Image (tube, rainbow, N blue to C red):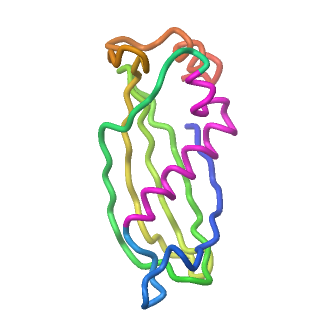
Amino acid sequence: MLKNKTESQIKFSEVDSLRVVWHGHYVRYFEDGREAFGKQYNLGYLDIYEHGLAVPLVDLQVNFKRILEYGDSAIIETIFINSPAAKLIFEYTISSAKHGYVACTGRTTQVFMNPVNKELFITMPPFMEEWKKKWNL
C-alpha cells in the first residue's frame, strides 16, 4: 500500500466566525494530500502532464466526523487505491493534530484525459503501467 502523511496548519482564512474550518476547505486538504503523495512517489500533476495527460476529478466523497478549529493542524493521510481501470483513486483521513481524532474521511477518483482533444483513456496509459510496476502494484 502506498501512502503519504502531510500536515497543514489551519489558517484564519479557512474558518468561520465560530473558528471552525468551513466544510469546503476539506476538499483543498484532499488536494494537498494528493500533491504531497505525488511529490513522494513521482506522480504529481506535472509528472502526468509531461506524458501529455490531465487527470480531472470525476468523483468526490467527503464524510465529516468532527470539527477542525483555528490554531490546530490537519494531518492528511492519503492512500493510493490500486485499480486495473484507467483511474487514480485516493482515500483520505484527516485528523486533528491537537486532539488526535479523525475529523474527516473521503475518497476521490480521477480519470486520464488528453488535455487537447478532451478524450478519455479507456485503458491504462503506458507510463502509469510502468509506474505501477516500479512500486510493485
Q: Is residue 72 left or right of residue 29?
A: right
- Residue at the front extreme? 116
- The answer to whether 126 is drawn above or below residue 40 in the figure is above
In front of the other: 112 or 126: 112
Residue positioned 62% across, 83% down in the render: 71
Question: Does residue 33 show up magenta in the picture?
Answer: yes
Residue 23 in picture, x, y percent from top left: 37, 69
In front of the other: 30 or 80: 30
Residue 62 in picture, x, y percent from top left: 33, 58
- The answer to whether 5 is drawn above or below residue 8 in the figure is above
Residue 111 in picture, x, y percent from top left: 37, 27
Residue positioned 41% across, 22% down in the render: 112
Q: Quadrant of the C terminus?
A: top right
What number of labels is visible? 0
- The answer to whether 107 is drawn above or below residue 114 in the figure is below
Residue 132 in picture, x, y percent from top left: 56, 20
- Residue at the top extreme? 126
**What secondary structure predominates along the stretch shown in magenta?**
helix
Residue positioned 57% across, 15% down in the render: 51
Q: Quadrant of the N terminus?
A: top right
Q: Residue 55 occupies which quadrant of the picture?
A: top left
Stretch in magenta? 24-49
Q: Is residue 18 left or right of residue 98?
A: left
- The answer to whether 19 is drawn above or below residue 21 in the figure is below
Residue positioned 42% across, 57% down in the render: 27
Question: Does residue 95 show up magenta in the picture?
Answer: no
